[in-house]
Image: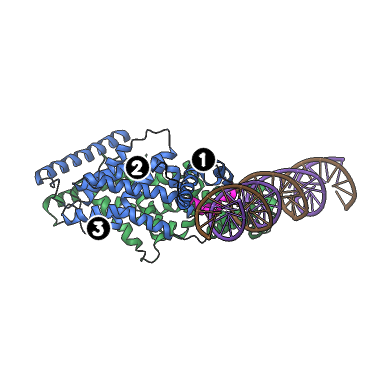
Chain colours: A green, B blue, C brown, D purple
Amino acid sequence: MSGTKPTRRERLEAREEVILDAARKVFRDGGYAGAKMSDIARAAAVAEGTLYLYFKNKDALLEAVIERFYDDLTDDAERGVAPIEDTFERLAFLARHHVDRCLAEWQLLELMIGLYRGGMGYDYGSHRSLNRRYVAIFDRVIREGMHRGELRDDLPPRLLRDLFYGTLEYAIRTLRMHPEETPDNDGTVAGVLSILRQGAVVPGASAQPPSEAVRLERVADRLTRVATRLETRLDDVR
Amino acid sequence: MSGTKPTRRERLEAREEVILDAARKVFRDGGYAGAKMSDIARAAAVAEGTLYLYFKNKDALLEAVIERFYDDLTDDAERGVAPIEDTFERLAFLARHHVDRCLAEWQLLELMIGLYRGGMGYDYGSHRSLNRRYVAIFDRVIREGMHRGELRDDLPPRLLRDLFYGTLEYAIRTLRMHPEETPDNDGTVAGVLSILRQGAVVPGASAQPPSEAVRLERVADRLTRVATRLETRLDDVR
DNA sequence: CATTTTAAATGAGTCAAACTCATTTTCGAG
DNA sequence: CTCGAAAATGAGTTTGACTCATTTAAAATG
């Protein structure tokens, strides 16, 4: 790799990266209005006009930045969920992941929401597809949970999604707004899960004194999981 | 009232109202970037410079508009909750009210979120106190519900608040983003309440936990379903 | 290797919109 | 009616996004 002269295309892509990185930083700590195109150009060591060769305008540049953020978020979520078996552990991971990442770069998140500030004839399309891919991970977990009989299947997944991400993002916003209070992300995540558990779970799966009924249900859980494993194996065989 | 010549102070306040009304309209259907100060001035039948006698700058004007929106929202919520006795009916009212109002003027809502777009050294203070007053209504309902023994009191009200408003606002955003799907506000509201009900209610206070016999039957059902799944798979393989 | 052609980069210049301020208008008190 | 202060005005300034004629670098050609 080193030693080979980069092709034209490679040079262009590298420069785009540089610009995106610079823009991300400037947007992150300046906000939309605070981020001047001239600042971004300087940070990327590029002339101002050059920015417009790579991105139509300031909005398009911000959108590209957000697209990258979203992509990273999605990839990491996907990788993180993959090895986890239990539905609730999966949800716990997704919640943690979302909160941690969004807190780390919450400015970008707010910017993203702000991008779609009314009117301005904006094209939601690209954001929609990003969101769809991210949210698909959650949906898959939910669907599988329902299929395994661990989750109530009379609730639309859409509602669960709104509840899950809505609660988390609202909590993040609340948190950023009252910085004097101690964060307690764990508390938030645990709380959401607790409500989901006792609110979206097939009745009986909760703690309590482990009655015979509950034990039976746990056995059923285990059998369900075994079945899932078998199914996976069968898929492999084929 | 009519016939009396307005005092100087009254005239000033009236003019401020006019400006605020104009600004609200222009912001609402132009968005932040789309709303030009000159448009607002024209809509208020006032010179551009005059705007700056009443509001320090564009941001301050937007903030004032939002403050009014929030105030109205709060007053109506307060009035609406007052005569209702039952905790869940109160929550249902608050949810409905929030969704309806926010959908009607969602542009303002997004603008509000957007106002606090990073950096720009903005003072969250005023928004915080607005939010506090609005949210206090919800908190009161929750606290009373806990006191009456209708709600679990091991959950922090803050979490319930994040869940309630977070879910609703996320749902609203989802809705605005996918206009092809049918709205179904009722569904959303009902869903949130259902989850709250079965997730935040003291067990036994409302729906009794199912009897052991019922649970056994459910377990049997689940096992049957598992078996069916396995059989299907095996058939596929063969 | 020299030359032509084509792509990429530049930054001075344009333009639009937020904001300022010297001037004018309005209005009430004396 | 007159004067002074408060309020309003809009032409002018400033700022920052965006354009485009020109320059520079790279690739193709012979």
**Left or right position of A123 against C11:** left
Image mark 3: chain: B
Amino acid found under the numbered disc labelled 2: Val
Of marks 3 and 2, the one in the foreground: 2
Mark 1, other Cα within 10 Å: few <14 / some 14–19 / many ≥20: some
Q: Residue at x 39, y 46 (%)?
A: A137
Q: Quadrant of residue A102?
A: bottom left
**SS at mark 1 in the image:** loop
Of marks 3 and 1, the one in the foreground: 1
User: Which quadrant of the rendered structure holds the N terminus of chain A?
Assistant: bottom right
Label drawn at residue B99: 2
Q: Is residue B12 magenta?
A: no
**SS at mark 2 in the image:** helix
Measured in 3D between alpha carbons, the distance from the residue under mark 3 to the one under mark 1, in whole angstroms, is: 40 Å
Label drawn at residue B155: 3
Q: How many marks can you see?
A: 3
Amino acid found under the numbered disc labelled 1: Gly
- Vertically, is A65 above or below B236? below
Image mark 2: chain: B
Image mark 1: chain: A
Are the numbered discs 3 and 2 placed on the same chain, yes or no? yes
Nearer-the-camera pick, B19 or C7: B19
User: Which quadrant of the rendered structure holds the C terminus of chain A?
Assistant: top left
Region in magenta: B45-62
Q: Position of residue A48 (x, y in %)?
A: 68, 53
**Are the residues at dot 2 and dot 1 in contact (C-beta closer than 8 Å)?**
no
